[in-house]
Structure formats: structure tokens, C-alpha cells
Image (tube, rainbow, N blue to C red):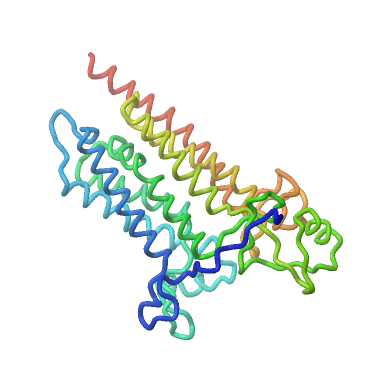
């Protein structure tokens, strides 16, 4: 009995691999369409429930479309810029910033906008929503609260796209749901720790290098940062006490879930840990909770930001209520 799973051989990054022109269509791009469509439908549901209405104005579908379109444009810009400037260690984008949005590689092959940062998308999307609300003179956190009722479930599709691409996989594991990803780093079978690892899993090989099972961290993120967080916010949407409450829960909840899951996800090999108890610690194993990745640094900021946002928006609402009662 094998205590691990192999990555499904029928899954390819391309939807139609080997087919001329159609081979350019990728699951990851399709998942973005699913994500934005899901977010729009859920936002539309909050509109039907009256969550976007005020005593002087009733939201309509034109508002929804322009609101979410503005957020998406800013999200994509933020996600791409942060990916290029924070996660690229070559320095190429700093010297040639015009390449950040260039969808071709040096050989002229179409690659799309390879590399997107969630945290950059979060910042960009948030700025976009604020810009739209100021432009349209709408209450910012009333609208943002409705948007966070939709974002997590849409985000689920993004992580499923990562899984379909066989990327952003986790650290090695002996858990029975560990999965062997084709593109993962291989290890020498001459290493004693590798032999011990293989023995625990019942693995055998005649090759000098072996690919070990890893946590399917993309699916962990899809479940907890996507479905679970969405359920929490969706169930609380009709019970919110002030504008900004749901936004605060999203920022705090995502930061917390992602911070924990990062212990199972392998950091980028060219970046490693931002904070490390042991600078020589391998990134493919979790040897200490004090080894902190780039994603965890940003998530810790989100956790603090969620708490600060909750306090700030609550006090602001309380102040406005007090003033209106005078």
C-alpha cells in the first residue's frame, strides 16, 4: 500500500495541449474567468438583498459592473507589479519596468503575464474599490463589505488554477494525501534522510534521484482561504454590526489562514526565508516555526491590519451615529 498519491497524468497547464493555437489556452487563465464571474454573481446577490442600498439610493447593475471592473483592473495591475518587483530576484524588471506587462519571453513566445502576487492584487483591488467609491460618491466600506462576500469563493478558482499548473506546491510530507508533483525538486537517494523518508512511505526506486510527495498546499489554500473564509463571511453578512466589519474579518481571516498554510507551502527557491532562525534551513522541510517566508510577512501585516481596520471602522461608525443623534 502506497502512502502517497501521484499528480494526475492527464492534467496539463494547457486546456488543449498540442493543438495549434488552442494550445495557448491555459487552465489558469480560465480559472480567472470563473473567479471574476463568481464574484460578480455573488455581488449581484448582495445587491438583490439590499446590502448596497442607502436611504437615498438604490444600487443597479451598471454600478455593479463598473465597480467590479474597476477593482479587477487595479487588482491585475497590483498583482503583476508586486510579483515583478518583490518576487523577481533577477532585477530585470527594476531595470526594464516596461517588461512587467509584456506577455512574451525573450524568444518571442507568448507566455501571458506569468507571475501574479495575491498581496499585490489585494492592495491594488482595495485601492481600485476606494477610487470607484470616491468617484461615484458611494459609502466605501458598505461596498467593500459586499465585495468581500464574493472574493474568497472566486479566489478558490485561482488556487485550483495553480494546482492545474502543478505549481506553488508544498513541502515534502509523509501524510497519505501527499502528492508527487512532476516539476518538484528531486533528491539524492544516497542521502540517509531520503532513505528514511522513502522507507516511511514504502517507496522504492532504482534511480539515483527521487521525487518525494509534497503537501498539495494549493488545495489547502483553496479550501481554507477560499471556501471556509467565504462561508464565514457569507453567513455573517446579514448580521454585521457596522460598515467595515466584514472587510475586517476578510483581511484578518485571510491573513491568519494563509500564515498557517505557509508552513506547509514551499517558499520560492530563489528567495527562501525572509526571517530565519537557521539561515541554512532547507525550504523543502519545515524545521522551525521561526523560519518565516515572504508570504507570512505580508500575512502578519494583514492580521494586524484586519484588527486595526475593525477598530477604526467601528469607532468611525460610532462617531457618525453619535453625531446624527445630536
Of residues 207 and 248, which is closer to you in this image?
Answer: 207
> How far from the left and from the top, in percent, is residue 89?
59, 67
Q: Look at the picture and state if 181 lies above or below 207.
A: above
Of residues 100 and 109, which is closer to you in this image?
Answer: 109
Q: Look at the picture and state if 46 lies above or below 131.
A: above
Q: Look at the picture and state if 43 lies above or below 18.
A: above
Residue sitting farthest toward the top: 326
- Residue at the location (35% across, 49% down)? 127
Residue sitting farthest toward the bottom: 107
> How far from the left and from the top, in percent, is residue 72?
32, 55
Q: Is residue 182 left or right of residue 193?
A: left
Q: Is residue 262 left or right of residue 221?
A: right
Q: Quadrant of the C terminus?
A: top left
> How far from the left and from the top, in percent, is residue 28?
43, 64
- Report which quarter residue 33 is drawn in: bottom left
- Report which quarter residue 51 is drawn in: top left
> How far from the left and from the top, in percent, is residue 60?
15, 43
Looking at the image, how many numbered discs can be counted on the residues? 0
Of residues 193 and 18, which is closer to you in this image?
Answer: 18
- Residue at the location (47% across, 75% down)? 96
Q: Is residue 16 left or right of residue 190?
A: left
Q: Is residue 135 left or right of residue 35?
A: left
Residue sitting farthest toward the front: 1
- Report which quarter residue 1 is drawn in: bottom right
Amino acid at each position: 500500500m502506497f502512502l502517497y498519491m501521484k499528480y494526475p497524468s492527464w492534467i496539463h497547464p494547457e486546456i488543449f495541449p498540442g493543438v495549434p493555437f488552442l494550445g495557448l489556452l491555459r487552465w489558469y487563465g480560465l480559472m480567472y474567468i470563473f473567479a471574476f464571474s463568481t464574484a460578480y454573481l455573488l455581488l449581484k446577490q448582495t445587491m438583490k438583498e439590499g446590502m448596497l442600498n442607502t436611504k437615498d439610493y438604490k444600487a443597479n447593475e451598471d454600478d455593479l459592473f463598473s465597480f467590479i471592473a474597476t477593482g479587477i483592473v487595479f487588482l491585475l495591475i497590483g498583482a503583476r507589479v508586486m510579483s515583478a518587483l518583490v518576487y523577481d530576484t533577477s532585477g530585470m524588471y527594476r531595470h526594464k519596468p516596461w517588461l512587467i506587462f509584456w506577455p512574451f519571453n525573450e524568444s518571442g513566445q507568448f507566455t501571458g503575464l506569468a507571475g501574479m502576487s495575491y498581496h499585490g492584487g489585494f492592495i491594488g483591488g482595495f485601492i481600485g474599490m476606494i477610487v470607484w467609491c470616491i468617484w461615484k460618491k458611494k459609502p466605501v466600506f458598505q461596498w467593500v463589505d459586499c465585495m468581500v462576500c464574493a472574493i474568497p469563493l472566486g479566489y478558490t478558482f485561482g488556487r485550483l488554477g495553480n494546482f492545474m499548473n502543478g505549481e506553488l506546491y508544498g513541502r515534502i510530507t509523509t501524510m497519505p494525501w501527499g502528492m508527487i508533483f512532476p516539476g518538484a525538486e528531486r533528491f539524492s537517494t544516497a542521502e540517509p534522510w531520503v532513505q528514511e523518508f522513502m522507507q516511511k512511505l514504502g517507496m522504492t526506486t532504482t534511480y539515483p534521484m527521487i521525487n518525494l510527495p509534497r503537501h498539495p498546499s494549493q488545495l489547502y489554500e483553496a479550501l481554507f482561504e477560499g471556501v471556509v473564509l467565504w462561508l464565514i463571511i457569507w453567513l455573517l453578512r446579514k448580521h454585521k454590526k457596522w460598515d467595515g466589519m466584514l472587510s475586517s474579518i476578510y483581511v484578518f481571516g485571510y491573513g491568519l489562514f494563509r500564515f498557517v498554510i505557509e508552513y506547509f507551502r514551499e517558499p520560492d527557491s530563489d528567495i527562501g526565508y525572509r526571517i530565519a532562525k537557521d539561515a541554512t534551513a532547507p525550504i523543502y522541510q519545515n524545521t522551525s516555526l521561526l523560519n518565516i517566508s515572504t508570504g507570512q510577512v505580508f500575512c502578519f501585516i494583514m492580521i494586524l491590519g484586519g484588527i486595526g481596520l475593525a477598530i477604526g471602522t467601528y469607532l468611525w461608525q460610532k462617531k457618525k451615529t453619535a453625531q446624527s443623534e445630536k
